[in-house]
Image (spheres, helix red, strand yellow):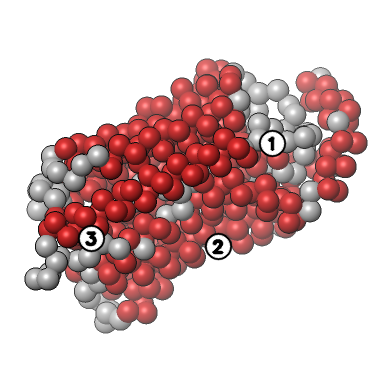
Amino acid sequence: MAVLQQQIKYEATNVQQVAYADDLTDAGRLEDMRKWWDLAVLWSTFGPISESMDAAFDNWGPSTVAMIINWGTIMYVIFVCPMAWATQRCGLRVGMVTCATLAAFSCFIRVFTKTTPAFTILCHLSSIILGVAATLVLAAPMLIASDWFPLNERTTALAVMLGASQLGCLGSYLEPLLIRLPSDDVTAEDIQNDVMRLMYTDAVVSGVLLVAVLVYFPAKPPSPPSLSSTSERFHVLSGIKALATNKNFMVMVVSYGVFVGPPVVWLTVINYSLIPLGFHQDSAMWVGLVSVVASSVLPVISGHLNDRFLGHTKLLLVLHMLATTACFYWFLLITYGAIPLSTWQVYVSVVGAISFNYASIPLFFEVGMDFAYPVPEILVAGIITAADNITSFLFLLIFNIPDVGYHWMTYILTSTSSLPILPLLFLKFDNTRANMDKLSS
């Protein structure tokens, strides 16, 4: 009966929807995606310049860099459910403006001083605030894809938004062009001045993006693109209870967290894996940069394939996971000298692993939404993303073990990429939401 009522509601708006779909050309849809370029990720600011930070600022080292990154994962897990509740109650625009304001403020407070320990304390505080802002920034793409795009474009739209967000990391991997390496001709004060110029640049850019969100970001589409986008959703508390008792969803979430979390956060501290191979921050920068570009493009291809060949999400997902595992195993062999070290093998193994891993994210999200329907998309995305934040937190926590070294990272990456494949093979993907939208089209 509820589905029939939603069908009637959908039919009532169908004329508007068709007109809207006719007007919304491919170029127009890309125009609607511009808002997601404001997902510039400040999360990895200090990882690509770790050698310079260690030399120029007192008491900086791998544990400091890891902890500053880790504050984002901790705050995300704590605030994701309250942010989902607030967004459902107040609307997406209010949530995005709030998060953009927090992100701008988190950059602004880092420009006051370069003196330690004050600078270090402000960097920790900035990361804490940014972690709160990220709760909506990372969870909203699924809601946008569901509310703005029809069935045969939904995964592609989600992938484009995730790719745009990933491209926001590009600037952090260009930082070694601005921040000098320590040397006989470069003093600690020189590096500190370079870092402060970067802090000022981040503050200006985040302020401009805040203005862009205030001016451009719309509250909702002119008409619903699909039946499932019009159906009534659970409230947040009811949704949390429904997800907690949904075995298929929980298996998928655990698999996603284990598979996605460590590689995503590893990219922010990749310098520590590459330095033993002779890649210092000025050369490791290019490995990270190519990885970011490739992992911004491959999810779009993956999402488009999923939309084109509906009903084959499980096969695509498993293939991506196998490819990720193969690339990390290749890098493991390089790291331990089992095969001769060469630059091209480092690039291909790292870029391949990161790209295939990131390309699996829109597929995981689509599967998760089908398992969870009709729980609100913002809550589903928040819970899914919280899973990878938890595993990221545990991964970064290992940096605090004295004399732990860096080889452990490659073992963990290979293990966490391969182990989640098995439980997914036994899950049945029902495509509930997709089947409903097919019937209504």
Vertical order, 324 against 345 (above or below): above
Q: Position of residue 204 (x, y in %)?
A: 41, 46
Residue 368 can be seen, yes or no: no
Look at 83% across and 42% down and name the residue there: 20
Q: Is residue 189 left or right of residue 263?
A: left
Look at 66% across and 31% down and name the residue there: 219
Q: Earlier in the sequence, mark 3 or mark 2?
A: 3
Q: Quadrant of the N terminus?
A: top right
Nearer to me, 3 or 290? 290
Q: Is residue 159 left or right of residue 99?
A: right
* Neighbour tally class for label 2: few under 14, some 14-19, many 20 plus, Cα within 10 Å: many
> What is the secondary structure assignment of the residue under circle 1?
helix
Q: Position of residue 167 (x, y in %)?
A: 48, 56
User: Mark 2: which amino acid?
Assistant: Val
For residue 306, the mark is: none
Gap between marks 3 and 1 measured at Cα: 41 Å
Q: Quadrant of the C terminus?
A: top right
Q: Is residue 203 left or right of residue 18?
A: left
User: Mark 3: which amino acid?
Assistant: Tyr
* Residue identified by numbered label 2: 297
> What is the secondary structure assignment of the residue under circle 3?
helix
Q: Position of residue 319 (x, y in %)?
A: 54, 61
Q: Quadrant of residue 218?
A: top right
Gap between marks 1 and 2 measured at Cα: 23 Å
* Residue identified by numbered label 1: 147
* Residue identified by numbered label 3: 272
